[in-house]
Image (cartoon, rainbow, N blue to C red):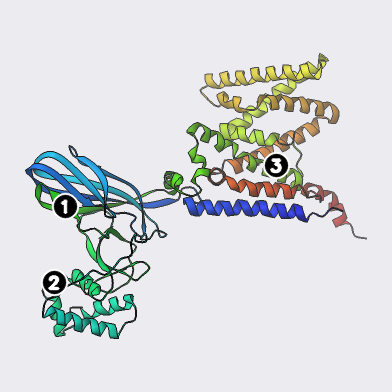
């Protein structure tokens, strides 16, 4: 007897491959498992105001580049009469507006759309950061040296030194050195200078606190140090390490936030708005930029996408039919005729489709009886039946339209040749087995078709089959497994019911 282990191993590989590819697509492309899932999106607007001085204007604003914790979706500028471009300067991205002549108050806008992304982080620096040289004048030099010595005694790493230094410079610390250093100096900049003096690369980053429907917000300074592997962010006032989820780092390594040539009284403020959009819409927008994006059906033209949406539902119908015939034991007219009927129901909706199907088959059987009396050959009989079915569906379409229903006009989605062949088979079955068998197989086909329709028309089924087509490998594996089933069908168990009641 041939071993079935290779067969079962192949089934295992099919199902595993389908599930693994689906998980990878979910992770890489961000496609949700369930339809209707919403994704939060932040719309942040930077407003630049200044007064032009009757001369050429060049305004330059630092803009975020791969901010940690967020994914940049889109960016645009609103600046009537100005030329606009995004330029790279020493590793920084800047938005530049230019105009030959401007006078009076000017307002420029720059908008970005971002989504929270926990996998996003600060990219590694292109060059190894080094601590910049810092010079101090007395008595600050002595105070800096004393405070750093105290912090070093309680620390062993750049991170711990940073935390200890922040603690020593807190306002509640009444030491003379602390009071001297914090008296007339920008506090975050003081921390950065002292850390650089200690040999630790440090810089100031500007973060924006995100809160829905807030206007006229300003950036808050954060401290960043380089520990040899990556930039770490600290709150300069509390010493807390890490960036809060609701803070967007707008500026990380720029010399200045805003530069305006040809104007004065410049300032920048921020407004923000939290929106929700379908997660699937975002996944489609990013499909081309991800590893599995080239396998996405969203790359196809819209017309072909519509076709595949219907075709990819067929395996679900095939799985339902295989289960109902092999395991349950329901007899149907033809092997996969119920799948085709279910496809038609998806197009026409269930109740109108049932009425149309029963009407076409009933009238077809009546006409088939007349054709049988003519003793025609099989090929001629089937060909004539196809033409008659077309006339019947056309008549139903016209009658439905005249009555104000458009259901009849969708009956043409029924496969005409399959319908004609079904009518022929039912007619032959009527002659050989009688009307009872025709009713059993006919209603069996409709029952299975209704079950397949309910499965295929479910929103979850359409979502999974189109967005995760590799799951069809799982369906294929299940159908192959059912093909190995040789036991009793559930509908046959009723034959053994008398044995249960028998008592010797």
In the rendered structure, the answer to whether residue 211 lies left or right of residue 417 reads: left
In the rendered structure, the answer to whether residue 488 lies left or right of residue 358 reads: right
For residue 503, above or below residue 315: below
Residue 55 appears in the rendering: yes
Residue 496, percent across and down? 85, 52
Q: Are marks 1 and 3 in contact (CB under 8 Å)?
A: no
Q: Residue at x 67, y 20 (%)?
A: 389
Mark 1 or mark 3: name the one nearer the start of the chain.
Answer: 1
- Label 1 to label 3, Cα distance in Å? 69 Å
Q: Residue at x 64, y 17 (%)?
A: 391
Q: Which mark is residue 321?
A: 3
User: Which of the two residues, 267 or 37, is positioned nearer the viewer here?
Assistant: 267
SS type, badge 3: helix
In the rendered structure, the answer to whether residue 235 lies left or right of residue 477 reads: left
In the rendered structure, the answer to whether residue 429 lies left or right of residue 180 reads: right
Q: What residue did someone put label 1 on?
A: 259
Q: What residue did someone put label 2 on?
A: 185
For residue 314, above or below residue 150: above
Quadrant, the C terminus: bottom right
Residue 237 appears in the rendering: no
Residue 327, percent across and down? 75, 48
**Residue 257, quarter of the rendered image:** bottom left
SS type, badge 1: strand
Residue 177, percent across and down? 15, 83
SS type, badge 2: loop
């Amino acid at each position: 007897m041939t071993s079935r282990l290779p067969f079962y191993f192949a089934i295992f590989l099919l199902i595993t491959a389908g599930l693994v590819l689906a998980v990878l697509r979910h992770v890489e492309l961000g496609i949700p498992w369930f339809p209707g899932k919403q994704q939060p999106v932040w719309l942040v607007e930077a407003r630049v105001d200044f007064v032009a001085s009757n001369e050429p204007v060049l305004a330059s604003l630092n803009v975020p580049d791969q901010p940690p914790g967020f994914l940049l979706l889109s960016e645009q500028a609103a600046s009537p009469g100005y030329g606009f471009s995004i330029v790279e300067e020493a590793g920084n991205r800047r938005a530049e507006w230019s105009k030959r002549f401007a006078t009076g108050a000017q307002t420029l806008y720059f908008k970005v759309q971002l989504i929270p992304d926990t996998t996003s982080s600060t990219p590694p620096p292109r060059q190894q950061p080094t601590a910049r040289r810092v010079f101090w004048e007395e008595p600050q030099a002595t105070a800096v040296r004393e405070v750093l010595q105290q912090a070093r005694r309680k620390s062993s790493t750049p991170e711990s030194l940073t935390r200890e230094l922040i603690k020593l410079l807190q306002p509640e610390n009444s030491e003379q050195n602390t009071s001297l250093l914090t008296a007339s100096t920008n506090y975050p900049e003081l921390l950065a200078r002292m850390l650089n003096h200690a040999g630790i690369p440090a810089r100031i980053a500007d973060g924006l606190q995100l809160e829905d429907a807030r206007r006229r917000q300003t950036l808050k300074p954060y401290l960043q140090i380089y520990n040899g592997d990556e930039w770490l962010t600290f709150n300069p006032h509390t010493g807390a390490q890490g960036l809060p989820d609701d803070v967007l780092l707008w500026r990380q390594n720029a010399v200045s936030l805003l530069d305006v040539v040809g104007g004065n009284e410049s300032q920048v403020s921020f407004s923000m708005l939290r929106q929700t959009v379908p997660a699937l819409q975002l996944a489609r927008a990013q499909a081309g930029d991800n590893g599995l994006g080239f396998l996405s059906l969203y790359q196809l033209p819209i017309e072909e996408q519509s076709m595949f949406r219907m075709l990819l539902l067929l395996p679900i119908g095939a799985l339902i039919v295989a289960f109902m015939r092999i395991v349950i034991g329901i007899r149907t007219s033809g092997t996969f005729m119920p799948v085709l009927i279910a496809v038609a129901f998806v197009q026409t909706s269930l109740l109108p489709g049932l009425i149309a199907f029963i009407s076409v088959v009933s009238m077809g059987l009546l006409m088939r009886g007349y054709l049988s009396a003519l003793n025609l050959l099989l090929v001629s009989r089937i060909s004539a039946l196809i033409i008659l079915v077309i006339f019947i569906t056309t008549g139903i379409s016209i009658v439905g339209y005249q009555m104000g229903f458009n259901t009849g006009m969708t009956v043409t989605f029924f496969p005409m040749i399959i319908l004609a062949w079904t009518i022929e088979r039912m007619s032959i079955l009527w002659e050989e087995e009688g009307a009872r068998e025709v009713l059993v197989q006919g209603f069996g086909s409709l029952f299975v078709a209704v079950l397949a329709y309910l499965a295929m028309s479910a929103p979850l089924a359409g979502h999974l089959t189109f967005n995760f087509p590799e799951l069809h490998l799982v369906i294929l594996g299940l159908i192959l497994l059912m093909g190995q089933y040789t036991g009793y069908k559930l509908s046959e168990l009723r034959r053994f019911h008398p044995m249960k009641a028998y008592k010797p």
